[in-house]
């Protein structure tokens, strides 16, 4: 499990040391740095997945497109370098320094560190790089589990694919995740329809296979939901049929509620994951009714409790409350959930406040502190209507 991510001169952070738990929730105002944390992990994943022998951090790829070095290196403090560091299980730590000129579309791996062996190397080292470290280096051997975790990372952006009439089929060996927009969810579901999911996530009295369990979990959001996938003859694609009433035929996704196709890739990604894998999700509440948003919080807590590490970014107090309810119901211990509230750097500096605050949960799902702006808009509005503010 990743236990911390460190960023230095990366986008809006001069220095960030952010603790991570099996379930980590990132909240805060717009443009405060929440997505930046996810993007740092995705950049490492993207480089390792698309070009394992690369000596450069790929800023633009299939998962994320961040532009140039000038877009990711802190202009005030970073000059032409930034750092990303990761800690795993509080025993293994590694960090990279990346350099580039303002218009470069990839960053050179200038040097790296492996704390567990006090090992450091610089880019001029003649050894070839694999997964951003010299192939035969001591850190490379010590962080093999971390490398595997990053290379199999699942990531879903807030801009997920909407309803489609057909969905492309991909080779199961080449596409092990649903894709950043959920574009491979139907393919992953079709190819892995008969594979078993983690036992802890299996709904009772339902076959433990991926398709049937995805269908059963979808019912939590859309009662009576049923799915069918059919291969299109002589074409690398499938059709997805959906119905939410057993008295009707299956419909095309374009004739169902938009929220259904937004939830499906999250469910497929979560149930396809294996223990110790990492799942990153932006705004899981998109196009969901408040009750569905709370259910999403409960579901993602269950996923974390099953051993899949979950990092989610959300603006929904209902998602937070779903997590709180799950903690109170002993689905996950409060010590295994982290809440982080982000402020824009300029605002934090002007007010002399930390850029990130981390409220704590107790066993009853109570939050110990509520920083101004941390899911408090409902209370502020009610106070206004009552004439108290």
Image (spheres, rainbow, N blue to C red):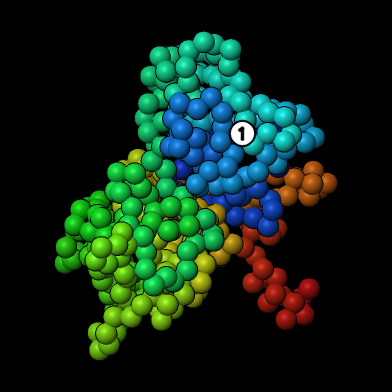
Q: Does residue 213 appear left or right of residue 357 in this picture?
A: left
Q: Could you say where residue 70 lies in the image, as x and y percent from the top left?
A: 72, 38
Q: Is residue 66 above or below residue 203?
A: above
| Residue 264 to residue 331: above or below | below
Q: Residue at x 25, y 63 (%)?
A: 234
* 251 vs 114, nearest the viewer: 251
Percent x, y of residue 362: 48, 52
**Which residue is rendered at x = 38% and y = 41% of the image?**
152
Q: How many marks?
A: 1
Q: Residues within 10 Å of mark 1 (few under 14, many from 20)?
A: many
* Left-right relation of 299 to 371: left
- Image quadrant holding the C terminus, namely bottom right
Question: Residue 180 appears at what percent x and percent y?
Answer: 47, 53
Residue drawn at x 79%, y 43% as measured from the top left: 349
Q: Quadrant of residue 139?
A: top left
- SS at circle 1: strand
Residue 386 drawn above or below residue 215 = below
Q: Position of residue 110 (x, y in %)?
A: 61, 20
Residue appearing at x 27%, y 67% in the figure: 232
Q: Residue furthest top?
A: 126
Residue 352 falls in image quadrant: top right
Against 20, residue 221 (above or below) is below
Res 254 → quadrant: bottom left
Position of 133 with respect to 345 (left or right) is left
For disc 1, the marked residue is: 106
Is 110 in front, or is 126? 126
């Amino acid at each position: 499990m990743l236990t911390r991510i460190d960023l230095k001169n990366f986008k809006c952070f001069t220095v960030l040391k952010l603790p991570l738990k099996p379930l980590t929730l990132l909240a805060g105002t717009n443009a405060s740095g929440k997505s930046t944390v996810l993007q740092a992990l995705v950049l490492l994943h993207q480089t390792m997945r698309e070009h394992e022998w690369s000596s450069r951090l790929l800023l633009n790829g299939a998962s994320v497109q961040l532009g140039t070095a000038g877009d990711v290196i802190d202009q005030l403090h970073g000059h032409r370098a930034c750092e990303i560091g990761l800690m795993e299980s509080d025993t293994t730590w590694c960090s990279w320094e990346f350099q580039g000129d303002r218009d470069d579309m990839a960053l050179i791996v200038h040097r790296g560190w492996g704390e567990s062996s006090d090992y450091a190397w610089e880019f001029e080292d003649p050894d070839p790089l694999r997964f951003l470290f010299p192939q035969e280096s001591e850190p490379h051997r010590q962080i093999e589990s971390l490398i595997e975790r990053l290379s199999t990372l699942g990531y879903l952006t807030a801009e997920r694919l909407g309803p489609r009439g057909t969905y492309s089929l991909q080779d199961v060996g080449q596409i092990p995740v649903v894709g950043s927009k959920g574009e491979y969810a139907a393919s992953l579901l079709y190819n892995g329809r008969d594979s078993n999911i983690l036992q802890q996530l299996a709904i009772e009295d339902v076959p433990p296979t991926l398709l049937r369990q995805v269908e059963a979990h979808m019912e939590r959001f859309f009662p009576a939901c049923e799915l069918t996938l059919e291969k299109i003859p002589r074409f690398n694609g499938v059709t997805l049929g959906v119905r939410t009433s057993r008295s009707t035929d299956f419909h095309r996704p374009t004739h169902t509620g938009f929220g259904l196709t937004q939830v499906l890739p999250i469910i497929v990604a979560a149930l396809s994951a294996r223990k110790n894998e990492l799942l990153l999700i932006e705004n899981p509440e998109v196009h969901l009714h408040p009750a569905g948003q709370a259910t999403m919080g409960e579901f993602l807590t269950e996923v974390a409790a099953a051993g899949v590490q979950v990092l989610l970014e959300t603006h929904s107090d209902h998602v937070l409350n779903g997590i709180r309810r799950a903690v109170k119901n002993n689905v996950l211990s409060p010590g295994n959930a982290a809440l982080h509230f982000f402020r824009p750097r300029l605002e934090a500096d002007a007010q002399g406040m930390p850029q990130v605050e981390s409220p704590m949960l107790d066993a009853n799902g109570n939050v110990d502190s509520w920083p101004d702006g941390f899911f408090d808009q409902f209370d502020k509005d009610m106070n206004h209507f009552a004439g108290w503010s």
